[in-house]
Amino acid sequence: MLDDLDRQAGQTAVPGARAVGFAWDRADGSTRTWWPQGLTTSADAAAAPGSDLGGRRVLLCGWYAKRRGGGHAATRVSVVDVTDLQAPRYAHVQLLDAGLEPVRVHAGGLAWCGDLLLVADTRRGIRVFDLCTVFRSADGGFRLSQCGSWTPDQAQPTPPLRWSFLSVDRTAPGELSLVAGEYNRYGSGARLARWALDPDTCLPRTTAPDEVIRTDITSMQGVVRVDGTYVVSASHGRIRRGHLWTGRPGGQWVKHAGALPVGPEDLAYDPETQRLWTLTEHPGQRYVLSLALPHHPVD
C-alpha cells in the first residue's frame, strides 16, 4: 500500500525541540475525535531496516477515537513513508478484530516485528496483526484485521502490568526483546518489563517477564532499551514540555528535563541512525519527530 498513500504531511520545526519533525495534515492535526499515541518504525521490523520495503523508511503511528461519554470508539494506524522527510505521505488503516468489528483500544504502544504489528491492549497484553493482510474495504479505506493475541502470566509481575506502551530492542547482539511499561500519573510503583522474543513468532518466549524494573517515574508514555540502557518519555501536562529519563537496572535514573515537546507519547529507536522517534498528542501541537539519543552517565 506504500504506493497508495493519500495524505500529505509537511516537514516543520518542532517548537522548543532540537529535532527533525513533521506535522499531520490540517484535519488530522486538529481533530478532537482521533488522538495519536503509539509509534514504531521499519527499523524495528528487521535487523536490516527497509529490507522488505524497497529501501523505504516507514513509521506506523497508532490513534484511538474518543467515544462520546468516555471510552474508545475505534483504533487506527497511520502508515507514513518518511524516506523523504521533507514531504512525508501517509494513509490511515482501521484496525478490526477477528469478527471484523472495530478494535477499541488506546493503542499507546506499537511494536513492529517481521510482518507482524503488536498493539498494546491495556488490560489484556498484546493484539497481533499481520501487515501483509491490509485490504481495501468497499468505501475505499484501508483495513487490517486481528490475527492473534498474547496474554502474559497475570501472576507476574504483581499486580498485573498495565500495558501502556511497547517497543522492540534489537541492540543486544543475538537478542530480540520486547519492552513494555505502564502509565501512572503519580509515578508511584510505575514499572517497566522486558521479555525475550522468539524471532520466528515475534511473541514472548515465556509468559513471565525476564526483567521487571520499578521506576516511580511520573506519567511515563514510552520506552526503548538501547545497549542495556532504558530511555523513557514522560509527559508533564498540557502546557509544559515533556522529559526524557535514562537509567539502567539497579542504577540511578537521570532526568533530561524539557527534552521533549508538550504532550509526548510512545518512543521508538532506529539503530542505524542512532536516533529516537516520538510523537505528540494535543490538537494544534501534533508533531512526529526524530531526536538524538540522550547521554546517560556511566553508573
Image (spheres, grey):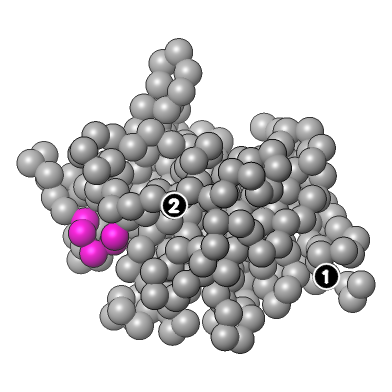
Q: Which of marks 2 and 1 is nearer the N terminus?
A: 2
Give amino acid for label 2.
Trp
Q: In this view, does 87 lie above or below 286?
A: below
Q: Is residue 163 above or below residue 271?
A: above
Q: Mark 1 packing: few (<14 Cα in 10 Å), some, or many (20+)?
A: some
Pick the quarter of the image with the N terminus: bottom left
Looking at the image, do the residues carrying marks 2 and 1 touch, with CB atoms under 8 Å apart? no
Q: What is the number of the mark on residue 296?
A: 1
Residue 141 falls in which quadrant of the image? top left
Please tell me whether residue 125 belongs to the stretch shown in magenta.
no
Q: Mark 2 packing: few (<14 Cα in 10 Å), some, or many (20+)?
A: some
Magenta residues?
A: 130-134
Q: Where is residue 192 in the image (x, y as percent from the top left)?
A: 70, 53
Q: What is the number of the mark on residue 150?
A: 2
User: Can see residue 191?
Assistant: yes
Per the picture, the main secondary structure of the magenta-coloured stretch is helix
Left or right side of 260 for 256: right
What residue is drawn where x is 42% and y is 28%? Answer: 72
What residue is drawn where x is 90% and y is 61%? Answer: 252
Of residue 24 and residue 105, the one placed in the foreground of this image is: 105
Q: Position of residue 69 (x, y in %)?
A: 45, 13
